[in-house]
Image (tube, rainbow, N blue to C red):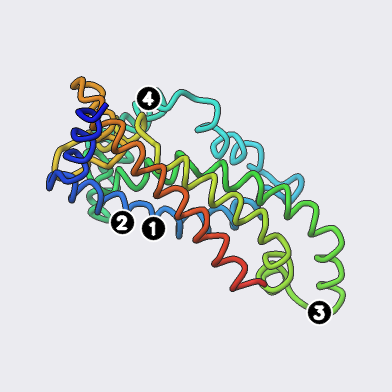
């Protein structure tokens, strides 16, 4: 038992963890911001009934929940690869390359957790907009003002719950990241991929230590979001 504990402490003290830890922090913060923006906007769009393309958008948003992550990552690799029309266009036009890059890791993180943000927000908006939205529009507010100043503050519970679930899911993302980011040491290896690498190499104490570290990080994110929401909306 003491030997395992010593190995876990040695794993946490490994300087090689600095890069994946810092990369994970950066990706998590960026994902949190994008989840808020995309979750709120896509949730609002899907809460609006019967408009052309709504069903297709709903399928695309929900896909990461029902499709195996490795298979989804492979599809993203085919779609965004340098030899694909879309991938080549993005690289030539905007200089964006999502394959084996940090941008690909961020995209994988956002995709993995986005449905868990959008769905609660969509349900909350659909419920709140019936009464609050009509009252706001009666008072002369436009759709944007109604959403920002009336509906969004009243669905803060759903937004925070979605962000917590989405961020937790993104922190543990492996399949899409493995395909799209490539698990390149010193470039695209996140903490979750470090756990994958440790298990793959039979370094179970290291995997256990990193899993515990991610668990603690998830708890801090949970309480941080709850505290932030109470300050902003309380």
Residue under the point 12% across and 48% down = 15
Quarter of the image for the C terminus: give it. bottom right
Tags 1 and 2 touching, CB below 8 Å: yes
Query: Considering the numbered disc 4 on the image, is that residue within a helix, a strand or a loop?
Result: helix
Above or below, 156 against 176 in this view is below
Quarter of the image for the N terminus: give it. top left
Q: Looking at the image, is mark 2 or mark 4 nearer the viewer?
A: 2
Calculate the distance from the C-alpha at mark 3 to the C-alpha at mark 4.
49 Å
Q: Position of residue 198 (x, y in %)?
A: 22, 28
Q: Residues within 10 Å of mark 3 (few under 14, many from 20)?
A: few
| Left/right of residue 29 with respect to residue 84 in the rendered view | right
Specify which label sits upstream in the sequence, 3 or 2: 2
Q: Residues within 10 Å of mark 2 (few under 14, many from 20)?
A: few
Residue at far bottom of view: 140
- Residue identified by numbered label 2: 26
Residue under the point 36% across and 39% down = 212
- Residue identified by numbered label 1: 29
Calculate the distance from the C-alpha at mark 1 to the C-alpha at mark 4.
24 Å
Specify which label sits upstream in the sequence, 1 or 3: 1
Q: Looking at the image, is mark 1 or mark 4 nearer the viewer?
A: 1
- Residue identified by numbered label 3: 140
Q: Residues within 10 Å of mark 1 (few under 14, many from 20)?
A: few
Residue under the point 53% across and 50% down = 164
Calculate the distance from the C-alpha at mark 3 to the C-alpha at mark 2.
41 Å
Q: How many marks?
A: 4
On residue 70, which mark appears? 4
Tags 3 and 4 touching, CB below 8 Å: no
Rendered image quadrant of residue 153: bottom right
Specify which label sits upstream in the sequence, 2 or 4: 2
């Amino acid at each position: 038992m003491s030997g395992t504990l010593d190995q876990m402490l040695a794993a946490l003290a490994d300087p090689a963890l600095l890069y994946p830890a810092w990369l994970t922090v950066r990706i998590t913060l960026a994902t949190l911001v994008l989840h808020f923006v995309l979750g709120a906007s896509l949730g609002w769009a899907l809460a609006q009934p019967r408009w052309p393309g709504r069903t297709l958008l709903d399928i695309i948003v929900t896909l990461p929940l029902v499709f195996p992550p490795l298979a989804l990552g492979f599809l993203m690799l085919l779609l965004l690869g340098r030899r694909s029309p879309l991938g080549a266009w993005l690289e030539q036009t905007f200089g964006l390359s999502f394959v084996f890059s940090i941008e690909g890791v961020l995209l994988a993180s956002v995709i993995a957790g986005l449905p868990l943000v959008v769905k609660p927000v969509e349900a909350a908006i659909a419920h709140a907009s019936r009464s609050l939205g009509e009252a706001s529009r009666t008072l002369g507010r436009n759709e944007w003002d109604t959403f920002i100043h009336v509906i969004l503050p009243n669905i803060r519970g759903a937004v925070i719950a979605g962000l917590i679930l989405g961020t937790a899911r993104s922190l543990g993302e492996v399949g899409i990241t493995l395909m799209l980011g490539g698990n390149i040491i010193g470039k695209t290896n996140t903490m979750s991929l470090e756990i994958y690498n440790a298990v793959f190499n039979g370094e179970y104490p290291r995997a256990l230590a990193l899993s515990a570290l991610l668990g603690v990080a998830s708890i801090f994110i949970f309480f941080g979001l709850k505290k932030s929401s109470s300050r902003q909306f309380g």
